[in-house]
């Protein structure tokens, strides 16, 4: 969920060390019920806390573990604070996501969803060849260390009674783009490794609906990074041992719905059908793309309507006006 300016200010003050953690937690505990009520009023069935407590959706791993340092990176022409792993991971705040989910559950009667960054994504963003090599000589050494940490967070979410646990993995989706694939010696092996990491995180965890979010890496008003339909990654997606695939379709770069015919029937599909990257307000009848025969959205299955990626909380999140966000 987009953050009002006062929430952005609180997070910056807390990250900069100007606000004690207890004070930050108390003030965010006052703000989160508003997030829940806003989603309830909109008629949303499965809600989140908007990730308002997080500096970024990926950086939450640095709240769970020691071993990271903040650095400054240039991302899409903007300077961002970015965590880099510099020493071996030490879990110091186990069950953080479940604790936050428990607070949200106390303030709503709706089902609750929590997002977890994937090990592959964290490895891509937070491992640095020079700064990280003393602790983890290779990126894969780092991602392997992340699997048990994220798995325990997932189990804690299940035990807290969360309805949906979603692993966010935009980097897997970037392999739709031939330019991205060209940057790897063996892109098929990379996709297979990414899926293997995800499957090891979720292996044997029942009692919670498991989802994977895929997008082309949102850049706020500037659009997206990856270009291309889902075809090149369909074999990898078919190997995921999850219940739901959350896919974006509101942007032209995502291709059409025909690819859904080639996904296994066991998946429920989250259809990203609202473009929230700009101030244009989509109407319910806007998307009139043809639905091919056999497309899963014709079938009697639990399809899920959702906004595309971009309704984000972080530094490069959406820049809609308050009135646009509400709509």
Image (tube, helix red, strand yellow):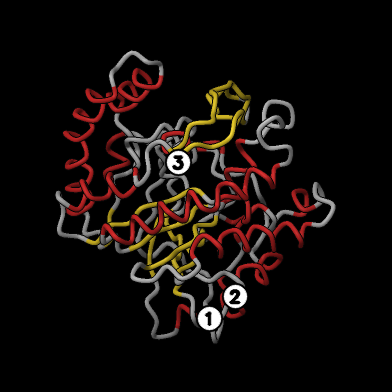
Question: Which element is circle 1 on?
Answer: loop
Query: Which residue has dot 2 on it?
Result: 258
Query: Which residue has dot 1 on it?
Result: 295
Compare residues 283 and 163 and report the one nearer the observer. Answer: 163
Q: CA distance from mark 3 to mark 2?
A: 30 Å
Query: Which residue has dot 3 on it?
Result: 57
Q: CA distance from mark 1 to mark 3?
A: 32 Å
Question: Taking 109 as reference, is 67 above or below it?
Answer: above
Residue 168 pos. (x, y %): 50, 52
**Which residue is depicted at the point 41% across and 56% down?**
154
* Mark 2, other Cα within 10 Å: few <14 / some 14–19 / many ≥20: some
N-terminal of the pair, mark 3 or mark 2, is 3
Compare residues 203 and 223 and report the one nearer the observer. Answer: 203
Residue 38 pos. (x, y %): 20, 47
Q: Dividing the picture into quarters, in which one does residue 219 lie?
A: top right
Residue 319 pos. (x, y %): 42, 33
């Amino acid at each position: 969920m987009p953050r009002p300016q006062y929430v952005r200010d609180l997070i910056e003050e807390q990250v900069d060390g100007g606000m004690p953690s207890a004070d930050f937690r108390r003030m965010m505990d006052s703000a989160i019920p508003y997030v829940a009520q806003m989603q309830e009023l909109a008629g949303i069935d499965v809600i989140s806390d908007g990730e308002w407590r997080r500096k970024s959706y990926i950086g939450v791993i640095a709240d769970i573990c020691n071993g990271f340092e903040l650095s400054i990176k240039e991302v899409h022409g903007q300077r961002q604070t970015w965590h880099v792993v510099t020493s071996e991971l030490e879990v110091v705040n186990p069950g953080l996501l479940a604790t936050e989910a428990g607070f949200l559950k106390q303030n709503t009667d709706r089902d609750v969803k929590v997002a977890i960054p994937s090990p592959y994504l964290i490895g891509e963003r937070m491992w640095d060849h020079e700064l990280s090599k003393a602790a983890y000589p290779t990126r894969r050494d780092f991602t392997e260390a992340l699997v048990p940490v994220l798995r325990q967070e997932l189990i804690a979410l299940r035990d807290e009674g969360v309805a949906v646990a979603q692993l966010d993995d935009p980097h897997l989706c970037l392999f739709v783009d031939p330019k991205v694939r060209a940057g790897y010696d063996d892109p098929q092996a990379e996709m297979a490794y990414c899926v293997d990491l995800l499957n090891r995180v979720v292996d044997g965890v029942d009692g919670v609906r498991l989802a994977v979010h895929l997008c082309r890496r949102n850049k706020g008003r500037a659009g997206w990074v990856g270009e291309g339909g889902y075809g090149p990654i369909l074999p990898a997606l078919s190997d995921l041992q999850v219940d739901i695939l959350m896919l974006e379709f509101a942007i032209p770069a995502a291709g059409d719905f025909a690819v859904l015919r080639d996904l296994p029937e066991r998946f429920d599909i989250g259809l990203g059908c609202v473009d929230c990257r700009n101030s244009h307000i989509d109407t319910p009848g806007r998307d009139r793309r043809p639905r091919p025969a056999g497309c899963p959205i014709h079938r009697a299955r639990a399809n899920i309507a959702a906004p595309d990626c971009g309704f984000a909380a972080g530094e490069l999140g959406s820049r809609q006006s308050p009135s646009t966000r509400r709509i």
